[in-house]
Image (spheres, rainbow, N blue to C red):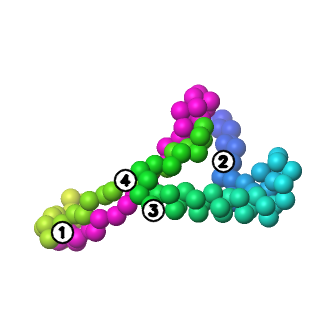
Amino acid sequence: MAKTAAKAPAKKALTKSGMITALAESTEMSKTDVAKLVTALTELIETELKKGAKQFTLPGIVRFGVKQVKAVKGGVKKTMPATGLEYTTKDKPAYSKVVVRPAKSLKDSLK
């Protein structure tokens, strides 16, 4: 029997420190300055979305939005299909969900 070729290991996602290092090298800024910039950008997005803005856009990169998820009333009796056991559902509170979508230019560049 012929052996199948081993798959190359999947490349790991870029970490925060890896991103800061890459940005520092490409912009010739110090790592501490880039780290401060990333932190300030994160705080800016957070404060804008908390203020009630429906969305925040980083032009050409990504769009952040907030979606309100309604509360779900519990107390309904259901059965598990796999085991046949009955259980009662619990209440789920309402919450805000952060939605992230790529910008059209980024989507088009990846085709």
**How many angstroms separate mark 4 from mark 3 (CA)?**
12 Å
User: Mark 2 sits on what residue?
Assistant: 10
Q: What amino acid is labelled 3 in the image?
A: Lys
For the point 79% across and 56% down, the residue is 21
* Chain-order first, disc 1 or disc 4: 4
* Chain-order first, disc 4 or disc 3: 3
Can you tell which mark lies on residue 67? Answer: 4
For the point 77% across and 51% down, the residue is 23
Above or below: residue 111 compared with residue 71: above
Q: What amino acid is labelled 2 in the image?
A: Ala
Q: Nearer the viewer, mark 2 or mark 4?
A: 4
Nearer-the-camera pick, 49 or 9: 49
For the point 58% across and 59% down, the residue is 44
**How many angstroms separate mark 2 from mark 4 (CA)?**
33 Å
* Chain-order first, disc 1 or disc 2: 2
**How many angstroms separate mark 3 from mark 2 (CA)?**
36 Å
Near mark 2 (Cα within 10 A), the count class, few <14, some 14-19 or many ≥20, is few
Can you tell which mark lies on residue 50? Answer: 3
User: Mark 1 sits on what residue?
Assistant: 74
Q: Position of residue 78 (x, y in %)?
A: 15, 64
Mark 2–mark 4 CB contact (< 8 Å): no
Can you tell which mark lies on residue 47? Answer: none
Magenta highlight range: 88-111
**Magenta includes 102?**
yes
Q: Kindly state the secondary structure of the residue where label 4 is placed.
A: strand
Q: In this rendering, does residue 55 appear at all?
A: yes
* Chain-order first, disc 1 or disc 3: 3
Near mark 3 (Cα within 10 A), the count class, few <14, some 14-19 or many ≥20, is few
